[in-house]
Image (cartoon, rainbow, N blue to C red):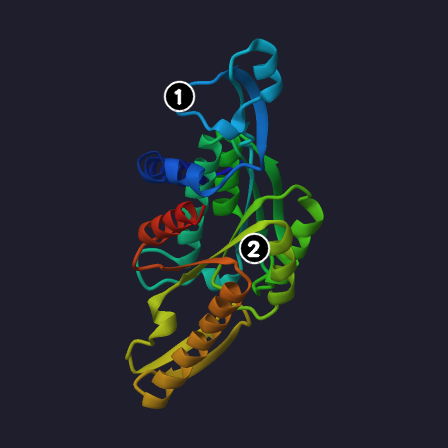
Amino acid sequence: MIPSEILKKVRLIEIKTRHIVNNLFGGEYHSAFKGMGMEFAEVREYMPGDDIRAIDWNVTARTGKPFIKKYDEERELTVMLIIDVSASGFFGTGESLKSDIMIELASILSFSAIKNNDKVGLLLFSDRIEEFIPPNKGKSHVLRVIREMIYHKAKDRKTDISVALEHIQKVIKRKSIIFLLSDFWDDSYQQSMKLINKKHDLINIQILDKAEITIPKLGLVKLHDVETQSSIWIDTNDKSLQNISPNNIRNKNDIIKKFCKNNKIDFISIDTSDGYLKPLEQFFNSRIHRY
């Protein structure tokens, strides 16, 4: 039995994200992600303004009037959401944790997909496969996806992106749109990411918190690593620490950004305190103008 507070959270996220989809991203999603091909619809009489390259010469010769072949986009797509549920997601210095932002983003993408009659699937991972829901259509299916994202308690704390990507390679045979949501505190992903991007359309979405980039000056602070379960005391006023720690994280960010650019993989960077609407809108617009 699912607790009532979880169902309430699902309902609140549904209301918030469906509103965003209906007002902002419904049309952009359809334009940004093309169908897998074109299928024949009908032959009709030529009208001024039609593309002459579409003329069906056999029918035209038979009837004595120009006719064209009309095709419709074979629209149905499959969207896979790969969500990092490792312990580092439960961090946030603003109103929302990184994991909260991931759930809202995944919900927006899910409702955008079903609005266009596309399928949605879910994979939750840490350093193992936590849960897999095969792609399907419909509102009830998307609500199940959202519920599992909220309700799931990860069995492991660390991150291994390659495990998730290798699993998707095995179970998803048809070319799909894959959204990978993570903070990317992992070094194991490069080879598996290259392989999956050859077959599928991979979009990496990185969710970060400003405090991970710039350490606030709070004096002596005890830091606890939720993934390794280790703790350490640091002096946040120490100038050398202020330079070293952010640089390590920036180096990791530079690596993933450069890797994605070199391998033509879409990359979206989102800060928990700045919101996700603008970066998401910029991404959709860049995809639309690419075609």
In the rendering, which numbered label is found on residue 4?
Answer: none
Most foreground residue, 192 or 101: 192
Q: Residue furthest top?
A: 63
* x, y percent for residue 229: 53, 72
In the rendering, which numbered label is found on residue 154?
Answer: 2
Q: Measure the C-alpha gap from mark 1 to mark 2.
A: 60 Å
- The image quadrant of residue 165 is bottom right
Q: Residues within 10 Å of mark 1 (few under 14, many from 20)?
A: few
* x, y percent for residue 136: 58, 33
Looking at the image, residue 132 sits to the left or right of residue 46; the answer is: right
Q: Which residue is mark 1?
A: 48
* Amino acid at pointer 1: Pro
Most foreground residue, 126 or 2: 126
Does 85 appear above or below 71? below
* x, y percent for residue 100: 41, 52
Most foreground residue, 125 or 119: 119
Q: Residues within 10 Å of mark 2 (few under 14, many from 20)?
A: some
- Image quadrant holding the C terminus, namely top left
Number of numbered discs overlaid on the protein picture? 2
